[in-house]
Image: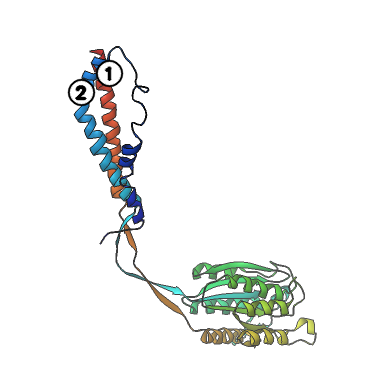
Amino acid sequence: MIRFAFPFLLFLLPLPFLMRRFFAGRGNGLESAVKVPFFYEVKAISSKMRPVYRFRRVSLFGVAWLFLVLAAARPQTPSGMQSYSVPVRDLMLILDVSGSMRQRDFVSQDGSVSDRLSAVKAAADTFIRSRKGDRIGIILFAGQASLYVPLTVDYPTLREMLAAAQVGLLGGMTAIGDALGLAAEHLGKSEAKQKTAVLLTDGVNNAGALMPPDALKKAVKEGVRVYTIGAGKPSAVPSESVDVVLLGQIARETGGRFYTVEDPQGLQDAYERISEAEPLSETDVYLMPQKELYPYPLFISLCLFSLNVFIAAAKRLWAKGGENG
């Protein structure tokens, strides 16, 4: 079944004939006449060309205009039902890359020691590989926050970018408020039904322009659920310990959960629990793509208009030959 995307354009079909009917030939014929001394010769030549000329003006032009209008109206035909799976959740990983993430105090079960950021990247990589159907992005923060990877479903590239993240890219301080506010800003623009962020840090907010309470209000306003992870062992120096009060408040007021971890296994467990709390989500969208047919009438129209031009040129050559004869 053929349908037209712009059927109202079909009303243009009689336009050339209406213009010829109401506008052509207006005015006094004598005023617009041209007197020539060889009138009878021209008349004789014109009488010979009249049948071909009429065919060109009426038939070819009319059919060419018909196909041109049909092409402009965009004829289409269904090409079959297709289904797509689209994500219903946007998820932002917010990772701390401040100077303290260099500390080598994460001991795995086999006794090997790694720095905090390496352990975090390994756990986050496993988390990404376990997801399906989510758009995932990465925000890195230290003294300032930056959108490192925009929301995407290109997981291989996402994992490559995650592996390339390094301590010191954004300074040595910790701007938790800026990072959370940036995540809320980007997720707030999303049309996904579910908006989730996973914030991981090993310190306290000591930099940035946006205070954590203000960033928290922004996240709540945008409907972002935030899971928080505090990485690292407690320290006798408050400025070197995880701000468990702040992270717990962020998780509680946004509907997420707060986890504290001290080793690679703890990181893996935290990300696994977050994945379980945020089940994989996709929705099927059914579309019926349309096959465009306009190139066919457009091609025919161009051919007919070209033929019109060819006949007009032939007429001029014929007339010129008659004069010379």
Task: Name the residue at 67% across, 73% down.
Answer: 181
| Above or below, 76 relative to 216 | above
Q: Quadrant of the C terminus?
A: top left
**Residue 114 visible, this angle:** no
Report x, y in % for residue 35. 33, 16
User: Toward the viewer: 69 or 161?
Assistant: 69
Give the amino acid type for the residue marked by disc 1 in the picture. Lys
Report x, y in % for residue 188. 59, 72
Q: Disc 1 designates what residue?
A: 320
Report x, y in % for residue 207. 76, 73
Q: Secondary structure at mark 2?
A: helix
Q: Quadrant of the N terminus?
A: bottom left
Give the amino acid type for the residue marked by disc 2 in the picture. Ser
Inter-mark Cα distance, 2 to 1: 15 Å
Give the crowd class for mark 2: few <14, some 14-19, many >=20 residues within 10 Å. Answer: few
Task: Name the residue at 35% across, 50% down.
Answer: 72
Q: Secondary structure at mark 1?
A: helix
Whether residue 173 sits left or right of residue 305 in the image: it is: right
| Above or below, 23 relative to 151 | above
**Residue 161 visible, this angle:** yes
For residue 47, the mark is: 2
Whether residue 279 sits left or right of residue 6 in the image: it is: right
Whether residue 217 sits left or right of residue 324 in the image: it is: right
